[in-house]
Amino acid sequence: MTHEARPVLENLRPITPAGKDLDAAIAFYQTELDFKVTYRDPAGSMAVIVRDCAEMMLQVSDDAHWASQTAYLIRTRNVKAMYDECLAKGGKAIHPNGQLKKRPWGTTEFSIIAPAGVCTTFYEFLD
């Protein structure tokens, strides 16, 4: 009798609305957040982007409702350094209400808003 190892979930790759212009979405994530493209389909309708262990699948979509209702939380080691990276690039990606702050639930976090309207919050649990 063999003993099967317990499955381990290693990563989550969400499908992320990119807006109508995949090139513009890719440029935003590369320029503002240092994501790298690891795959782009030949038809130009989707791309996979990665930074460290965070992955997203950008999908061309002009559905503004989908984008405005999409939000992600990315646990981040040294969130202050990530915030400083965004500020050093002019801070234009930071959500108007998303400045770095300590939250009552124990995180320090900030949020960015992508051109398509997707909100991503980078957070860290701090003492």
Image (spheres, helix red, strand yellow):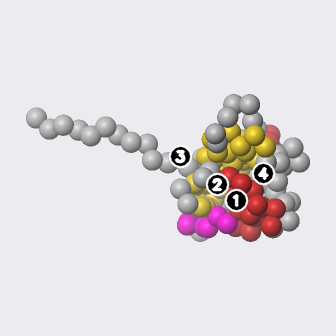
Tell me if residue 70 comes above or below residue 77 in the rendering: above
- The residue sitting at 23% across, 38% down in the picture is 4
Task: Judge depth for marks 4 and 3 and give the one in front.
Answer: 4
**CA–CA distance between discs 4 and 3?**
19 Å
Looking at the picture, how far across and down is residue 99, in whole percent? 83, 48
Comparing 37 with 81, the one in front is 81
Amino acid on which disc 2 is placed: Asn
Residue labelled with disc 1: 81
Residue labelled with disc 2: 78
Neighbours of disc 3 within 10 Å: few (<14), some (14-19), many (20+): few
Q: What stretch is highlighted in magenta?
A: 34-40
Name the image quarter holding the C terminus. Answer: top right
Tally of numbered discs: 4
Q: Can residue 15 be seen in this view?
A: no
**CA–CA distance between discs 4 and 1?**
14 Å
The kind of secondary structure the magenta stretch mainly shows is strand
Q: Are marks 2 and 3 in contact (CB under 8 Å)?
A: no
Mark carried by residue 12: 3
**CA–CA distance between discs 2 and 1?**
6 Å
Looking at the picture, how far across and down is residue 9, in whole percent? 43, 42
